[in-house]
Amino acid sequence: MNILDQIIEHKKKEVEDRKSLYPVKLLEKSIFFATQPVSMKKYITREDKTGIIAEFKRKSPSKGIINAHAGVERTSIGYMQAGASALSILTDKQFFGGANEDLTTARKYNFCPIIRKDFTIDEYQIIEAKSIGADAILLIAAVLDPERSKILTAFAHSFGLEVLLEVHDEDELKKNLDVGADMIGVNNRNLKTFEVSIDVSKRLSALMPEHVVKVSESGISSPETILELKKYGYRGFLMGENFMKHSRPDEAAMEFMTELRKQETVKQHA
Ligand SMILES: O=C(O)c1ccccc1NCC(=O)[C@H](O)[C@H](O)COP(=O)(O)O
């Protein structure tokens, strides 16, 4: 069993447990108080933003512990002050050390789009995402067939949530172009082998129609890479480890985005 299979096996049990612990009726009470959703699609395409979706993640299967001490409040506020377009908050506990409370904390301190980064396989998780204040959810093509992705996308939309649909190869992309997702994310990391290559984003960009809002995910560690990916039509850039590996991810994000803006200005005047 590869790590993705293990995560999904665990997730199925977790979802059933949560359904009995926190029934939908209970979640609906929080939905009533939820704020109006903020469009991630709009924010990542705004000219005054960097397009960076800055991620809060404590650990991952491929890297182990990345940062056990950073706080969500300071990090998320710092990410937004640095110029991020959106926040990505890992809520999976078992494999990424996250929690729903991380997202509610980020929501409390930031008016910006927040994507709930988890392994969504069930409608219940979409209601849960809404109830904790998310604006968008992630769907991973490698663990869902396109028909199921279509159903979950429509369900998310019925709650005002946007969908970032993640693919890693040509086959997944072709099968999922029509599921109705708001953004398509190309994960540069193979979630089965952990191999990372920005070339995956470059290769798949040619297969996506112009109107698709494209997001490149994982392994981005330099402003030069972002400028390069922009040439391939990418508008969003999901970055986690590059910030989280520092003791102050907020400061690392500020330094990175300042340098990105500097390089963009130089390019515009060249
Ligand atoms: O990163 C992993 O080890 C991983 C393993 C299994 C499923 C998902 C996994 N990662 C999720 C991501 O793709 C990243 O958190 C995200 O794209 C940011 O990547 P990075 O900037 O490289 O931290």
Image (tube, helix red, strand yellow):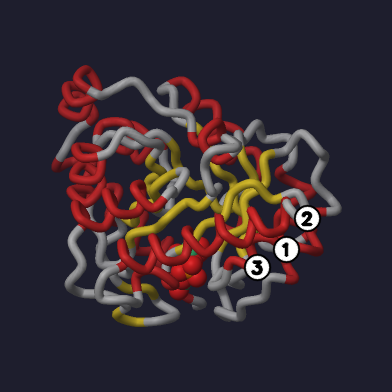
Q: Which mark is residue 231?
A: 2
Instruction: Give the number of the disc on residue 164.
Output: none
**The disc labelled 2 sits on which kind of residue?**
Lys
- How far apart marks 2 and 1 lie (CA) works out to 5 Å
Is 89 left or right of 210, judged from the image as shown?
A: left
Dot 1, crowdedness within 10 Å: few (<14), some or many (≥20)?
Answer: few
Q: Would you call the spot at circle 3 few (<14 residues within 10 Å), some (14-19), or many (20 or more)?
A: some
In this rendering, the answer to whether 201 lies above or below 103 is below
Which residue is farthest top? 32
CB atoms of marks 2 and 1 within 8 Å:
yes
Residue beneath disc 1: 228
Number of residues whose C-alpha sits closer than 10 Å to that of mark 2, classed few (under 14), some (14–19) or many (20 or more) = few
Amino acid type at mark 1: Glu
Cα distance, mark 2 to mark 3? 10 Å
Instruction: Measuring from the top left, give residue 213's x and y in whole percent.
Output: 67, 40
Q: Is residue 4 visible?
A: no
Q: In this rendered view, identify the residue nearer to me: 227 or 71.
A: 227
Residue 142 on image: x %, y %: 60, 59
* Badge number at residue 225: 3
Q: Nearer the viewer, residue 207 or 222?
A: 222
Image quadrant assignment for residue 29? top left
In the displayed structure image, the side of residue 70 where residue 3 appears, left or right:
right
